[in-house]
Image (cartoon, rainbow, N blue to C red):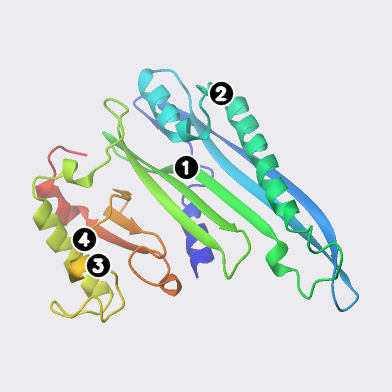
Amino acid sequence: MIKKTFWLVLLFLIGREGKTQGLTYSIDSLNLKVSRTVQLEDGTTDTVSCSRYHHIIWFNEANEIAKKINRFLYSDLSDQDIQSVAELQQIFKNDFSTWKEEWMAQFSAEDTAPIDFSYNLNWYEELYTGELHRTANTLTIISATDGYYGGAHPLSGSRYIVFNLQNGEPIEKWQNLVTDTLAILKIAESIFRKEKGLGPHASLAEAGYWFNNEKFHLTDNFGFNQDGFFFFFNVYEITAYAAGPIDITIPYAQLKRYLKKPL
């Protein structure tokens, strides 16, 4: 379910190229993979692998806004000031080499005896950075990860970043966008309870949701899409893994009166 949700989100992004207020970007990708043959207890062999896929967008640096967005999106990858997609790809390759060594280390205990299964030896990671939605004054970027690193199940997560297109700065708090935060909380909780089939006074804890003191709250992982203003809770944030990620979208019709500035 979570894997399907991950790729459904990304389908909206594939093949798009943005162009608003002179802000354009190019799309690139990088596939990295290493494989190894292992012997199983039943006498057969299997090929396992470690792979990583990167989907990259790079804003064409014709103005300072584009430069600011690129630096913010990729600043956590290296101490250096990345100037091009080629430099970005080289960092990804170096990082994969380190990750590959970690993957290879698990075979040290397996070399002396066959293993009974191989599925948990196939590690992968898919990293996706793309444009989700753009208005006259905002740009919403998604940075999503889906991967398996051994263990009980894959892990996935999405981070959303809203940029102010007037200055290229990220809008880090949703409260900075609206005039009445309490009203937004009330609307969002009403939508959440309706979608989850909970009455207005039903216990959030008894329904399996982890809100401190059973007080509904919103996340700073937010953005805009074609339907409205959304808030995205990744797996494990407010409920069990099996429930998958949870998003709450406030339609623009309900949001409009509370916006500090037009979108």
Residue type at tag 1: Gly
Q: Which mark is residue 146?
A: none
Instruction: Note whether residue 86 is visible.
Output: yes
For residue 183, above or below residue 214 = above
Q: Which residue is mark 1?
A: 130
Marks 2 and 1: CB-CB under 8 Å? Answer: no
SS category of the residue bearing label 3: loop
Say which residue label 3 marks: 211
User: Label 4, label 1: how many angstroms apart (C-alpha)?
Assistant: 27 Å
Dot 2 alpha-carbon crowd within 10 angstroms: few under 14, some 14 to 19, many 20 or more: few
Q: CA distance from mark 2 to mark 1?
A: 17 Å
| Mark closer to the observer (3, 2) | 3
Q: Nearer the viewer, residue 49 or 161?
A: 49
Q: Earlier in the sequence, mark 1 or mark 3?
A: 1
The Cα atoms of the two marked residues, 2 and 4, are separated by 39 Å
Q: Amino acid at mark 4?
A: His
Q: Residues within 10 Å of mark 1 (few under 14, many from 20)?
A: many
CA separation, marks 3 and 2? Answer: 42 Å
- Quarter assignment of residue 85: top right
What amino acid does circle 3 point to? Phe
Is 127 above or below relative to 196?
A: above
Q: Amino acid at mark 2?
A: Ser
Q: Nearer the viewer, residue 78 or 29?
A: 78
Q: Nearer the viewer, mark 4 or mark 3?
A: 3
Q: CA distance from mark 4 to mark 3?
A: 7 Å
CB atoms at circles 4 and 3 under 8 Å apart? yes
Residue 22 in view, yes or no: no
| Neighbourhood count class around disc 4 (C-alpha, 10 Å): few under 14, some 14–19, many 20 upward | few
- Residue at 14% from the left image edge and 56% from the top image edge: 184
Labels 3 & 2 near each other (Cβ < 8 A)? no
Q: Which is closer to the viewer, label 2 or label 4?
A: 4
Which label was assigned to residue 217?
A: 4
